[in-house]
């Protein structure tokens, strides 16, 4: 058993908690049974323990170490990455799981109790009981993952970091709550994945288990980085390929005749572009590490190139490949857009719009990198989000408001407002930002050389 896991068990499962929790929950269950709410109270308590409290404890398991100044000591201890991951994810949430499992067992027992006060159809199904556990595990893993990402930026402010990590974790519960909603259409619906029919609730359970496995792998990867393991970047590119396979299976067979069909390009293009921005904002790279990576590329040290490569770079290559394929298939893509919804494009302008998406994505990458190598790299993502919101939101809105809609695409790939002129404007922004980025990196060169030696 992991030392970190045992330590958290001793902290979380005190004798007082072990004795008091069953007594309090037993009284709550008894009261709910007397009022005819036996199936509602255990489920509510489960979500309070495992969902609300569990995601908070998962996020705080790493944030409290950083704020308390004990994380550096833990990094120096002889604890492996898996042991640390297991100890943080399941040890820090031990009490939340203790209360949650008592509630879950009582909720599961209602499937076999003869309750005359409730209709049988309102009782939980075995599939729902398993889904509850799977999605809570996913939510807690995502909370810990977001907390690790923030912790790597060495930010101050425990409550803000904790609140953000918990909020993102709770968002992972939305697919379960939607599939479990008392909506006849959802309950009777099926999802076709690669032509195979799955009940919607069963497919949501299957998807939740897959994404939990990937979230756990991501936590382990970040934990290895914190413990100074030397790794080649491979998990995020593999996850990107998994997303392509996953979303491709959801495209109806009529629209997925070939790997370069318009529907597949559109769905996977959106997925990869979203993943690219998330990866870029969450981990643009340390300034010195970026310089060392560039030097390793120039000198041909390919293992070091793989170890220092920014995680978002392989994803950007996938975005570029899908974008180029979509430009080559612009006519078919435009025909598909016309069928699915009114399109502002003709055969030529849709290719320009896709090119603009790629150009402005490259521009946005340079914006983030500029802040990453700036005087406050720990705030690179926040500052970059503000400026990207201005470039993609405020500037186009202002131009549209003053009646200059033709130039609304000068800072963002606005559908119907991208022309060769706006495309040239995007390239000019890239050139200007590249010069500024080169200047800032040049000022860091001496520090990088000292760090290398």
Image (cartoon, rainbow, N blue to C red):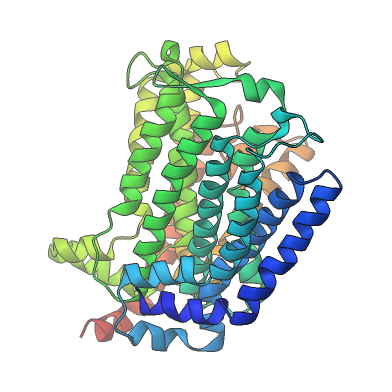
Q: Nearer the viewer, residue 320 or 15?
A: 15
Q: Nearer the viewer, residue 30 or 342?
A: 30
Q: Is residue 363 above or below residue 420?
A: below
Residue 110 pos. (x, y %): 67, 42
Q: Residue furthest left?
A: 300
Left or right of 371: which side holds 385? right
Q: Residue furthest right?
A: 35
Residue drawn at x 51%, y 64% as measured from the top left? 144
Residue 171 pos. (x, y %): 62, 50
Q: Residue 387, can we see it?
A: no
Position of the C terminus by quadrant: bottom left
Residue 407 pos. (x, y %): 64, 37
Left or right of 292: which side holds 3? right
Q: Nearer the viewer, residue 339 or 193?
A: 193
Q: Residue 183, can we see it?
A: yes
Q: How many marks?
A: 0
Residue drawn at x 77%, y 35% as measured from the top left? 403
Position of the N terminus by quadrant: bottom left
Residue drawn at x 52%, y 72% as measured from the top left? 92
Residue 115 pos. (x, y %): 75, 37
Residue drawn at x 58%, y 65% as measured from the top left? 98
Q: Is residue 14 above or below residue 330?
A: below
């Amino acid at each position: 058993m992991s030392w970190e896991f045992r330590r958290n068990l001793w902290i979380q499962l005190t004798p007082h908690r072990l004795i008091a929790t069953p007594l309090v929950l037993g009284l709550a269950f008894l009261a709910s049974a007397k009022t005819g709410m036996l199936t509602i109270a255990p489920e509510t308590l489960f979500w309070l323990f495992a969902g609300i409290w569990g995601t908070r404890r998962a996020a705080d398991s790493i944030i409290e170490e950083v704020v308390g100044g004990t994380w550096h000591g833990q990094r120096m201890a002889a604890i492996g990455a898996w042991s640390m991951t297991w100890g943080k994810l399941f040890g820090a949430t031990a009490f939340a799981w203790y209360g949650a499992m008592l509630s879950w067992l009582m909720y599961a027992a209602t499937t076999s109790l003869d309750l005359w006060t409730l209709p049988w159809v309102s009782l939980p199904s075995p599939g729902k009981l398993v889904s509850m556990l799977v999605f809570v595990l996913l939510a807690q893993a995502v909370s810990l993952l977001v907390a690790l990402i923030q912790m790597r930026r060495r930010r101050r402010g425990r409550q803000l970091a904790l609140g953000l990590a918990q909020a993102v974790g709770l968002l992972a519960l939305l697919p379960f709550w939607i599939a479990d909603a008392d909506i006849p259409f959802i309950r009777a619906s099926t999802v076709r994945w690669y032509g195979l029919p799955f009940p919607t609730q069963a497919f949501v359970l299957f998807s939740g288990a897959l994404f939990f496995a990937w979230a756990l792998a991501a936590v382990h990867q970040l934990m290895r980085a914190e413990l100074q393991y030397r790794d080649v970047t491979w998990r995020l590119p593999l996850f990107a390929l998994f997303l392509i396979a996953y979303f491709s299976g959801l495209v109806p067979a009529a629209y997925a005749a070939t790997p370069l069909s318009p529907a597949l390009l559109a769905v996977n293009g959106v997925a990869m572009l979203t993943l690219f921005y998330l990866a870029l904002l969450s981990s643009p790279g340390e300034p010195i590490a970026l310089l060392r990576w560039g030097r390793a590329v120039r000198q041909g040290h390919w293992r070091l190139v793989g170890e220092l490569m920014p995680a978002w770079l392989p994803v950007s290559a996938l975005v570029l490949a899908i974008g180029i394929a979509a430009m080559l298939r612009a006519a078919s893509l435009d025909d598909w857009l016309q069928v699915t919804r009114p399109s502002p494009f003709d055969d030529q302008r849709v290719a320009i719009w896709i090119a603009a998406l790629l150009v402005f994505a490259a521009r946005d990458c340079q914006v983030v990198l500029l802040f990453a190598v700036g005087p406050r790299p720990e705030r690179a993502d926040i500052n970059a989000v503000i400026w990207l919101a201005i470039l993609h939101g405020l500037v186009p809105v202002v131009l549209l408001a003053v009646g200059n809609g033709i130039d609304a695409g000068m800072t963002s790939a606005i559908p119907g407002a991208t022309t060769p002129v706006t495309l040239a404007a995007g390239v000019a922004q890239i050139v200007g930002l590249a010069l500024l980025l080169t200047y800032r990196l040049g000022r860091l060169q001496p520090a990088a050389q000292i760090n290398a030696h």
